[in-house]
Amino acid sequence: MLKIKISLLRFEKHMSCLKKFAASFAVFIAAYFCHADDSVATFHINLTAPLDYQIVQRATAAVGTLTIAGTVLPEIKTALPLDALEVRLTGKSAAGELPGQWQLLPFDARVASFRSELTVPAGGWYRLEMRALLAGVVITATNVEHVGVGEIFVIAGQSNSANYGEEKNATQTGLVAAFDGTKWQLAKDPEPGAGGAKGSFLPPFGDALVVRFHVPIGLVATGIGSTSVREWLPAGTPLTLLPPLTRNVVTVGNGQWVVAGKIFESFTARMKALGTNGFRAVLWHQGESDARQSDATRTLPGELYRQDLEQLIRASRQNIGWNAPWFVAQVSYHNPGDTASPDLRAAQKSVWDDGLALPGPDTDTLTGMMREKNGTGIHFSAQGLQAHASLWIVKISPWLEQQLGEVQKTN
């Protein structure tokens, strides 16, 4: 009896191996004959989302929604339909290692394109793997090495929001990524999508948030040097006064001008690319090109600055289709002899007081060696960039903790 049982076990084991071989052999034979009559079985997965180093905005402290989209196509028309698409994520979340199980994606072999949404724990970087199966056998696969679920911020304004600082910075945690509207990459100055070719406060800002909140941080830099708030308004907005630079202005009559609107369209397009509720907040840092200009006719009085900034906030929210939070900094510094404009600062504060925006940092306080050229310039020095990042952290962190509904622990 014992010999019979052992023989049966060996038989079952051999049969299992034969079944696996038969399935693989069936795919091989089918592919071979399909190739012979130009109908093929060679497939290719093209993922359009997520991209490498992409971060998605988490919806709660614990989770976010990851979109998986793309196409799966044969090299030429095939009579062999795929029977499944599967995906899995591996890596460490804020709560621990992911289980790394394969999951089926909704898929119709008659339609090349696919799109699904997965609820994913906050954290990263994760490795995303995807595979296609034919007759139960994996015939093609692809992967994305870096995917994160965390916090995303859009940074806008003029040069001190962009790449004009005295020293270049790069992420030290390796968990801060930048989005230029098309692709994601690790945050390294000059930040993609913003003006200037030098340094910014963004990598140290992102790193500080990583340390505090233990999730990847996404940054969308859109700042443009020397711009007035007037230049950021929607196309066709009438102007009462010309800005210092007129590159974004159109003359429409004798002493009549309107905004060209290219900056507004680019700015809102970058936000819309992230989707509804696809980022945490806009950080607005601008004012130097509106406060006390050498040509007084180009100075924007505080009342008009407030009017234009309110229009920009409301119009951008309407354009992107949701009520994105804004933080507005107090910014009016020019040089050691002109460190602040009370009129403009009052206008910036007024949008806080009326609930249109949240209080950003007071960067007019960054004087002396916090500025480039041994304290004589308008842009930030290496020391000033670090201080600038810290001022934003002081404003952002308590608010973000409140939004998440929990108090985060620092390391």
Image: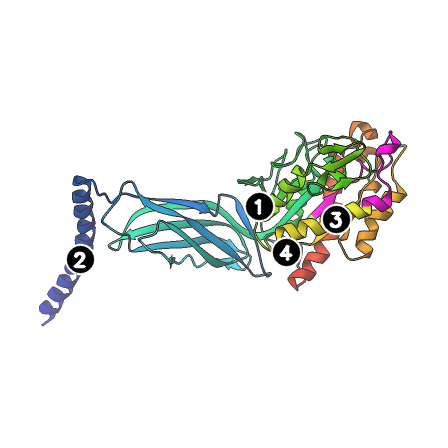
Disc 4 or 2, which lies upstream in sequence? 2
Report which residue position mark 3 lands on. Answer: 311
In the depicted view, which residue is nearer to us: 365 or 155? 155
Disc 1 or 2, which lies upstream in sequence? 2
Q: Is residue 36 left or right of residue 104?
A: left
Which numbered dot is residue 175?
A: 1
Q: Position of residue 279 (x, y in %)?
A: 61, 52
Q: Which element type, helix, strand or loop, lies under badge 3?
A: helix
Report which residue position mark 2 lands on. Answer: 19
- Which residues, given as a range, are shown in magenta? 283-305
Q: Position of residue 176 (x, y in %)?
A: 59, 44
**Cα distance in 3D space between marks 3 and 2:** 68 Å
Outermost residue, top direction?
373
Which circle, 4 or 1, is nearer the viewer?
Answer: 4
Q: Which element type, helix, strand or loop, lies under badge 2?
A: helix
Q: Which element type, helix, strand or loop, lies under badge 4?
A: loop
Disc 3 or 2, which lies upstream in sequence? 2
Report which residue position mark 4 lands on. Answer: 322
Disc 4 or 3, which lies upstream in sequence? 3
Q: Residues within 10 Å of mark 4 (few under 14, many from 20)?
A: some
Residue type, numbered disc 1? Leu
In the depicted view, which residue is nearer to us: 262 or 173? 262
Is residue 381 among the parts visible in the rendering? no
